Image: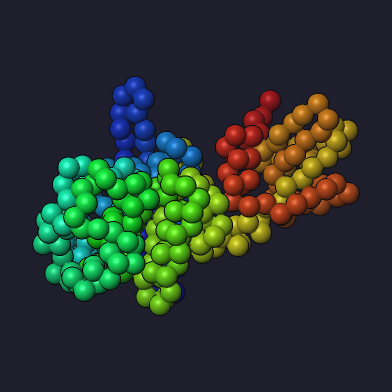
Amino acid sequence: MSIALETKNLCKTYPGPGGFELKNVGFSVPSGYITGFIGRNGAGKTTTLKVMLGLSPRDSGEVSLFSKSMPEHEAECKQDIGVVFGGFSYHETKRLRAVTRAFKRFYKNWSDEKYCELLRKFELDENKRIKELSAGMKVKYALALALSHDARLLILDEPTSGLDPVSRDEIIDIFREFVESGERSILFSTHITSDLDKCADHIVYIKDGEIAMTGDREQIIGGYRLVQGGRDDMSEGLRAALIGIKETPFGFTGLIRASELYLADGLKTAKADIESIMLYTEKYERHEG
């Protein structure tokens, strides 16, 4: 399997009160797939993407795009990627055609034909000003720009945040179509795990600036189970094995590794999903003592 993007031991420290640290972040994005980059707000998703793209200097570590090292081949690599960050930053009073005219000059493979095709597909009017677009239409316009220069990798930071369910579903369809040929890839940062259930093949989970888990989505999900029982069903061994526990006056629900499911013999169990793995790892995390 070829790799579109890879990071190794990526570190970045923002010192002082309220500072933040990326600690040896390492993961890869396989070619031809959608990789979901998940974590709660403030976990380090946007910081990782900015450091990875050279928008913020890294303290140490390695980044390669299409087997070419960054930043040594930065200009060449960036011709092959499309980037969409949350929080649309183009000047609100500019018309779309003016923004496009400025944007296209940076890409040698820009295709006016492809761009016009995407405008028609997304029902975008070039005469409109940025401020006249809805949140969903702004995302579609950003995608039209990113897709019009033959990008091989899309790097997207919270592109569906704030969109209604119908708009989010339309964007997900665009993502699936983009990777359909098997030659293009997406790194999709989000905290909306239901979107990943619809489209992601791989998952990278960051927690407090460190990679907590990474791998095939189905394998990750298959490695965990939810366990439910009454207050008297909790043995010491089971409590120690649970990654996270939500307790009520009547009983408990907890997340356990599938390999330790024997400790919950006789109790009700259910398959986990990405959202429940995040919830029980973060919100209901079990603490010693």
On screen, residue 146 above or below 24: below
Horizontal side of 92 relative to 285 (left or right) equals: left
Residue extending furthest toward the top? 17
* Mark count: 0
Which quarter of the figure has residue 71? bottom left
What residue is shown at x 11% (from left), y 62% (from top)?
105
What is the x, y in percent for residue 194? 55, 52
Residue at x 37% of width, y 50% of height: 136
Question: Would you say 285 lies left or right of 87 here?
Answer: right
- The percent position of residue 137, horizontal first and vertical second, equals 33, 52
Which of 186/173 is in front? 173
Q: Decide which of 250, 160 is in the foreground and name it.
A: 160
In this rendering, does residue 179 appear at all? Answer: yes
Quadrant where the C terminus sits is top right
In the foreground, 17 or 279: 279
Give the quarter of the image for residue 198. bottom right
Which is nearer the eye, 126 or 14?
Answer: 126
Outermost residue to the bottom: 181
Question: Can residue 213 be seen at all in this image of the molecule?
Answer: no
Pick the quarter of the image with the N terminus.
bottom left
Residue in the picture at 26% in, 52% down: 53
Residue 116 lies left or right of residue 46; in this view the side is left
Identity of the residue drawn at 27% across and 64% down? 119
* Residue 81 place in picture, x, y as percent: 27, 63
